Image (cartoon, rainbow, N blue to C red):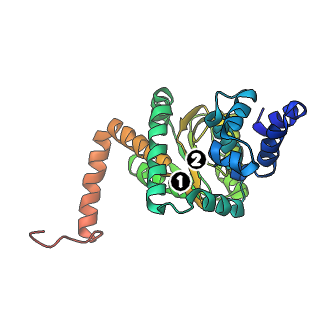
Amino acid sequence: MDILTALETRSPGFSKGQRAIAKFITESYDKAAFMTASRLGKTVGVSESTVVRFAVELGYDGYPTMQKAMQEMVLNRLTSVQRLEVASHRIGTQDVVSLVLQSDMDKLRQTEETLSRRDFGAAVEAILKAKRIYILGVRSAGALANFLGYYLNYMFQNVHIITTGSSEMFERIAGVTDQDAVIALSFPRYSSSTAKGAAYCRSTGATVIGLTDSSLSPLGQNCDYVLLAKSDMLSLVDTLVAPLSVINALIVALAAKREGELAKTFDRLEHIWEEYHVYEKRPDGV
């Protein structure tokens, strides 16, 4: 049961102050989710303690738990216009650089604590054993998919990167079999095509590895292994620092398993790069 359903169910028993809180959350959940208990109380004309008690009476451990529930609910519901409005409230007069960097560091810490090492290890083994590797990531997740695919192409011969929407995605994954591994990436606002594509691939018997922010997300529910990476929403920007860090870890783990083959590959590439002047040469003595 999400918080809006809980508010509707419990509303007959609310006091005047609680009704004011519930009304504001129901009508402006995109703003309420990022307010402190004190600020929410001032906005609706009740005390901070009333807001905290309200959270407890709804069944939460406290206001922070209720706030987290609101944030998780709204991240997938916010339109681009609402994102801009929320960003304005969150940033206020704060230093934007500090706010964004601190937020990114916080998401990295949360990811380090919540990422399942068992699922991570199983994902690495599934990729190593796969006949073909498919990477699904559209919209902003397309950048992550391309980055991952760029490095996996050094290690494997049959990597397919799919960053387009539903119709072309299904044409490209139509041949997926139980010998393949599929890596799907999706963060709020979740792409419906990625979740549907992952579900289809899983129905074929392929091993589906999801990189997302929750096992209960549309993608997380359609995966064999879920690599949790915390994301955030700041203005129009999807904060994808933590997901990229998990991708880095995945690449490093795979490279360690294929060290011998990679050494030969890069030895050949170094000769090609040198012969065709792929990279700028550093001046002597630098």
Label 1 crowding class (10 Å Cα cut-off): few <14, some 14-19, many 20+? many
x, y percent for residue 174: 68, 47
For badge 2, the amino acid type reads Leu
Is residue 230 shown left or right of residue 48?
left
Residue name at image x 31 percent, y 43 percent:
261
In the rendered view of the protein, which quadrant contains the C terminus? Answer: bottom left
Pick the front one: 229 or 149: 229
State the CA–CA distance, disc 2 to disc 1.
14 Å
**Pointer 2 or 1: first along the chain:** 2
Residue name at image x 54 percent, y 37 percent:
228
Is residue 114 shown left or right of residue 195?
left
In the rendered view of the protein, which quadrant contains the N terminus? Answer: top right
Label annotation for residue 239:
1
Question: As displayed, is residue 163 above or below residue 20?
Answer: below
Q: Which residue is mark 2?
A: 185
Question: As displayed, is residue 283 above or below residue 247?
Answer: below
Residue 170 seen in this snapshot: no
